Image (cartoon, rainbow, N blue to C red):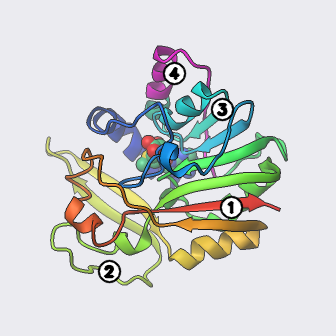
Amino acid sequence: MVKEIEKWWDEASKWFQEEIKIPTHTVHWGIHAPYEKELKLLGNVKGKRILELGCGGGQNSIALAKKGAICTGIDISIEQLKFAKKLAEKEKVKVKFIKGNFQNLSRFKQCSFDIAISAWSFQYSPNLKKLFKEVYRVLKRNGLFVFGYPNPYHDIINVKTFKIEMSYFKIGRYEEIEIWPDGSKHKFVRYQVKISDIYNNLVDAGFFVERIIEPLSLKDKSFEKYYPTKLSKLIGPTIIFKARKI
Ligand SMILES: C[S@@+](CC[C@H](N)C(=O)[O-])C[C@H]1O[C@@H](n2cnc3c(N)ncnc32)[C@H](O)[C@@H]1O
């Protein structure tokens, strides 16, 4: 299961990083969401140990390292990590990038991070319950867990017709065979959940959910092809959860 996702990201990384320009001066939480410099969800990160799950090209960890955080990024895709390592070198910051599956954080001791973050990666988790329990384990007491998630209501709408194309209640594995502009075929896999699944799994793992944020910022146009502004004005593509280990 993870292999299919890993393969898709290894193949997609080059065009994704060329096409989508993710900043390295602040944390981005997801498509058409304001940046951390506006939302201020993490507070002062200087000296904080931060784990980024599904770090992709590493931009968020790099932005946090620039602010004095001690960052570790984990991602399943070697191509994404190659990009991340080069970018950190170019930006002259130190981040520990690790190839691994965020479903299994056994390499990290319990209570080893002050903060865990993620942006648009948990839609690839087949088991949010297990993932959130693991994040709870590796966080210190009072540790923050903040992540941006593709809004499940947005995901059921066809971005061309704006019509609802699948039931909100159809949760679980979703797969699609994509044909890219060069004619090559790629299997895309993700998992559909309900908003209540995200919330309830956080609570079941032991977290206190401080905020659920449904933001909208239309400044970044780089996703326009996939997430048209016109649709985002009707329903935002990103939902952010801020939770705390209690
Ligand atoms: C949409 S990208 C987001 C990357 C980065 N957070 C960003 O905002 O640019 C999703 C990332 O999740 C990673 N990913 C998917 N499933 C994963 C898993 N089970 N463990 C670790 N990383 C995973 C992919 O390789 C990809 O880099």
Q: Mark 2: which secondary structure?
A: loop
Q: Could you tell whether 176 is left or right of 122 in the image?
A: left
- Which circle, 3 or 1, is nearer the viewer? 1
- Specify which label sits upstream in the sequence, 3 or 1: 3
CA–CA distance between discs 3 and 2? Answer: 38 Å
State yes or no: Cβ of the residue under disc 2 lies below 8 Å from any atom of ligand 1.
no
Residue 228 image position (x, y, % from top left):
22, 59
Q: Which residue is label 3 attached to? A: 71
Res 6 visible: no
Q: Amino acid at mark 1?
A: Ala
Q: In this picture, is 235 found above or below 81? A: below
Q: Which residue is mark 4?
A: 88
Q: Which residues are magenta?
A: 82-102
Tag shown at residue 19: none
Q: Residue at x 27, y 49 (%)?
A: 223
- Residue type highlighted by circle 2: Met
Q: Position of residue 194 (x, y in %)?
A: 50, 77
* Residue 46 in view of the camera: yes
Residue type for callout 3: Cys
